[in-house]
């Protein structure tokens, strides 16, 4: 039995996660050995108790084979303290240094480049997930005065960069993806940028099968918008990866389409979540697209060893999308639950 901890979170998190749980219900109904439990590690809990996680929460979650997260973010907690506690707590606490964010355009009509020859997107973003400015080294003095000083250090280490870069090269070699593009800013970031650039160049020597190229992040974003199909795999730091993965999502059908996994390849610990946030602007109205969450569930099934089911989930999402059985952002007129139902029906029919 594979045990999954489900943490729906805030805003549209619970709405889209409910549809992922329906997918798990379909599969377990067909005999797949899956069990799941839901946990309210969210904004409400934070506001009620002062903490989004109970004491020992990370150790408790580590007992599960995988964690499926919805999204965090609540206007009542403007500094996102609770989201950082759970989400960044999991990423750094479990050392989930690989944030793999695939961008794949499943329906060409959804591309902003649909009228051109450049619409296709099939890209893997390998985002460093524990360091850079997210290491949260820094501080502020004279807060609230006109002399306030704030420092947010960007921390990078050779070991931290190299393990992610090496993982990206290994994945590319295994899947035959090429080239692997390094995205950095070593023209301006003299120390950290240079560390990324040298580490990439030196690690590349161990992977002659994988071609390499380099882009500065500004030019990369421009090219990603003009011609996303020219990229196959990208390795980059935490902040650039955060930004680039939203741009890639936009090119691959929008925020409702982009899945992700936060992974430690050595321990096998993994947290699956859509790339998008809690979307307070549409929360509670049944408008949110559950596909990013369901595709993340597909990545989770793959990780748990259920490759066939993972493929069927992806195919069911694609089928509904191409049939126009989708939410409005994805070209349909269904609601969140209707879209999830369509995916589940198709999955069951093909199982
Ligand atoms: P967002 O991703 O929540 O929303 C950006 C835009 O995309 C909004 O217009 C939203 O309506 C739309 N959108 C997002 N997901 C969608 C879906 N599934 N279907 C249809 N439309 C969708 O980003 P934001 O507005 O900058 O942030 C809102 C909150 O979420 C903030 O508190 C932010 O910190 C948080 N956030 C959390 C995560 C996470 O939990 N991993 C990721 C990003 C942002
Ligand atoms: C994401 C989010 C998070 C990040 C926020 C909510 C801390 O934007 O998962 O992409 O910056 O990593
Ligand atoms: Mn983000």
Image: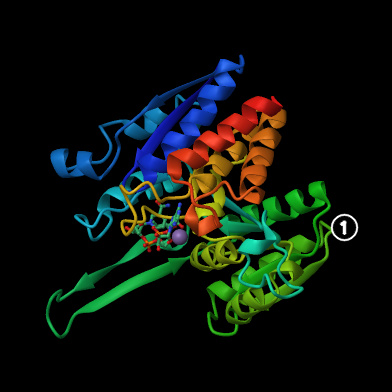
What is the quadrant of the C terminus in the image? top right
Foreground residue, 111 or 301?
Answer: 111
| Residue 267 appears in view | no
Locate residue 346, reporting x and y percent.
63, 33
Is residue 350 shown to the viewer in this render? yes
The quadrant holding residue 77 is bottom left
Front in this rendered view, residue 260 or 115: 115
Quadrant for the N terminus in the image: top right
Q: In the image, what residue occupies the spot 54% across and 76% down?
A: 191
Picture quadrant of residue 53: top left
Determine which residue is flagged by label 1. 209
In the rendered view, does 208 fall on the left or right side of 318?
right
Residue 25, how many percent across, how many down? 51, 23
- Horizontal arrangement in the rendering, residue 126 relative to residue 77 (left or right): right
Does dot 1 land on a helix, a strand or a loop?
loop
Position of 149 with respect to 172 (left or right) is left
From the viewer's perspective, is 41 left or right of 18?
A: left
**Residue, x 69% and y 70% (percent of image)?**
228
């Amino acid at each position: 039995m594979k045990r999954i901890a489900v943490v729906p979170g805030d805003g549209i998190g619970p709405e889209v996660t409910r549809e992922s749980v329906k997918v798990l219900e379909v599969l377990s109904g067909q005999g797949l050995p899956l069990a799941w439990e839901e946990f309210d590690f969210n904004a409400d809990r934070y506001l009620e108790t002062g903490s989004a996680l109970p004491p020992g929460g990370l150790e408790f979650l580590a007992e599960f084979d995988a964690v499926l997260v919805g999204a965090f973010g609540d206007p009542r907690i403007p500094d996102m303290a609770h989201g950082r506690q759970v989400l960044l707590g999991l990423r750094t606490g479990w050392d989930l240094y690989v944030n793999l964010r695939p961008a794949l355009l499943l329906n060409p009509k959804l591309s902003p480049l649909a009228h051109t020859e450049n619409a296709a997107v099939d890209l893997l973003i390998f985002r460093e997930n524990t360091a850079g400015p997210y290491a949260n080294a820094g501080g502020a003095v004279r807060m609230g005065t006109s002399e306030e000083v704030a420092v947010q250090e960007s921390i990078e280490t050779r070991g931290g960069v190299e393990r992610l870069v090496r993982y990206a090269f290994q994945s590319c070699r295994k899947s035959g993806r090429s080239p692997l593009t390094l995205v950095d800013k070593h023209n301006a970031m003299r120390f950290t940028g240079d560390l990324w650039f040298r580490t990439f160049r030196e690690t590349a020597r161990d992977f002659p099968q994988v071609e390499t190229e380099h882009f500065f992040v500004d030019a990369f974003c421009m090219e990603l918008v003009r011609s996303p199909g020219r990229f196959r795999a990208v390795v980059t730091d935490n902040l650039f990866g955060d930004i680039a993965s939203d741009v890639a999502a936009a090119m691959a059908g929008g925020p409702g389409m982009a899945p992700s996994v936060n992974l430690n390849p050595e321990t096998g610990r993994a947290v699956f979540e859509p790339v998008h946030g809690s979307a307070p602007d549409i929360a509670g109205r049944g408008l949110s697209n559950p596909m990013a969450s369901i595709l993340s569930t597909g990545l989770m099934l793959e990780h748990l060893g259920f490759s066939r089911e993972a493929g069927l989930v992806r195919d069911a999402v694609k089928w509904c999308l191409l049939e126009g059985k989708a939410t409005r952002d994805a070209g349909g007129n269904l609601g969140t639950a209707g879209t999830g139902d369509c995916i589940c029906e198709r999955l069951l029919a093909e199982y």
